[in-house]
Amino acid sequence: MMDWFVHNIAPLMFVGLIFFMVIGYPAAFSLAAVGLFFGLIAIELGLIAPDFLGNLTYQLFSVVSNELLLAIPFFTFMGVILERCGLAEDLLEGFGQLFGGVRGGLSYAVILVGAILGAITGTVAASVIAMGLISLPIMTKYGYNVRHATGVIAASGTITQLIPPSLVLIVLADQLQRSPGDMYIGATGASIIQVLLFMGWVFLLSIFKPDHVPALPPEARTLRGWPLYRKCIRGMVPSLALIFVVLGTIFMGLATPTEAGAMGVVGAFILAWMNRRLTWNLVYQGMDITMRLTAMVVFILLGARVFSLVFQGVGGGHWIESMLTSLPGGVVGFLIFVNIFVFVMAFFLDFFEIAFIIIPLLAPAATALGIDLIWFGVMICANMQTSFMHPPFGFALFYLRGIAPRTIRTRDIYLGAIPWLCLQLILVGLLIAFPEMVTFFLDKEVVQDLDTIKSLVPGADGGTQNGLDSPPSFGLDSPPKF
């Protein structure tokens, strides 16, 4: 019995972690408690030396001294300010009037505005709440199917997960030890495909079920001509300027994600001031939400480091790597298994917990199989979008339920999310089948064939000769004698 326990202590750590989380214990403290408990057991069994846990000091210090994680409070603060600065109202009203004359026009507007808000806020809650409050009453008023309306609002908010400057991409870059800028560039193509998939679904509905996505009646389209274009420009110009400040500076190498996030906060303050929404109450709410989210992330990461240290010490890393690399189907089999596993875990864990607990265990196996970690991270990020759309646990659905009228049933919100959840899974399949959707935008590494390298040294006559058949003269009349 004891031998079996010793050889299976790594999987038993997972069982213990699942037990604590199922009974509702906070994830951060569950991770730390399981890690320390099994660490003491491993010391008693002689699996690890007592001094091994001394590495915990360095692990925890590396968390609190990680400058990249400073981007999280900056982008969170920026998102909260932009959520309440009136920018979403201008964008939705302008695009709604612009596309309102076609079937599904309001849905197109919601998807495009969701992508724009995602590119300047980086937070799902801000996008879903802002668009739900503004567009849901209008869509239901003009005859849009309730399930479609709630589904498109929730789904367009989750685009924020994938489109830069997503908080998830920052965390994944940190866990995979890759550049956040490369992760952002790699996610650009995937996020564009996601938007096109959503718009394609609306187009199909407009053909086969036009009564679900009717066009706005003429009396509802009050803006035409130059006033309409001015309304769209008024919403687009500040958005594009802020996108350039946040993303353009990162892509061009002018700023780190942390520095871009700080500039984004300044830009959010300016937009709030321009829209006469900048108040002390708004600033206080932004700081409060940012503090809570940042504290949660740091505590989860600290707990994850405790768990990971002990897990690696008892051989858990080798167990995971050998198990995953021996799956049938090679790389494709590994990717299919990982995506199914992450999809199921997303029912119970949020994206921070998945990134801090699961990803560090999967990355070594992906590296051993020769998988590009930027592509791997973007694919996992696309999969983790589903954690916000899972009925009944999706946070985007919770946010929408909180601001939707009571006349809209919770059942309709859940059923409306299913088609969009399937579209997100289609994106994951496309990323597996066509890695170029990610790698095409990345700089290609220059591989030098060492066999083609020749060493050229000056000859006695001032020319060059290959190899080292005779020593160089170094400017002397004859080689030195020793």
Image (cartoon, rainbow, N blue to C red):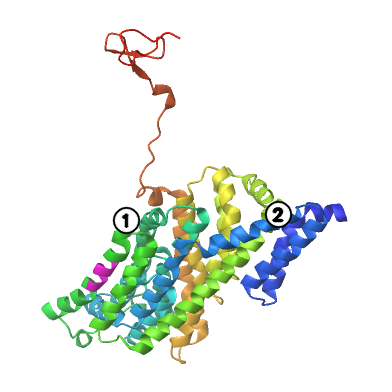
Q: Residue at x 35, y 88 (%)?
A: 280
Instruction: Give the distance between the C-alpha atoms of the residues marked 2 and 1, in whole angstroms.
Output: 40 Å
Could you classify mark 2 by the number of other residues whose Cα lies within 10 Å: few (under 14), some (14-19), or many (20 or more)? few
- Is residue 156 shown above or below 14? below
Left or right of residue 160: residue 316: right
Q: Which residues are magenta?
A: 238-243
- Is residue 261 shown above or below 87? above
Q: Position of residue 243 (x, y in %)?
A: 29, 66
**Outermost right residue:** 1
Left or right of residue 341: residue 242: left
Report if residue 241 lies within the magenta region. yes
Viewer-proximal residue, 466 or 405?
A: 466
Viewer-proximal residue, 238 or 94?
A: 238
Q: Which residue is mark 2?
A: 52
Q: Position of residue 122 (x, y in %)?
A: 39, 70
**Outermost bottom residue:** 406
Q: Residue at x 70, y 63 (%)?
A: 35
In the rendered image, is residue 207 in sight? no
- Secondary element at image label 2: helix
Whether residues under marks 2 and 1 lie with C-beta atoms below 8 angstroms apart, the answer is no
- Is residue 98 shown above or below 322? below
- Secondary element at image label 1: helix
Q: Which residue is mark 1?
A: 251
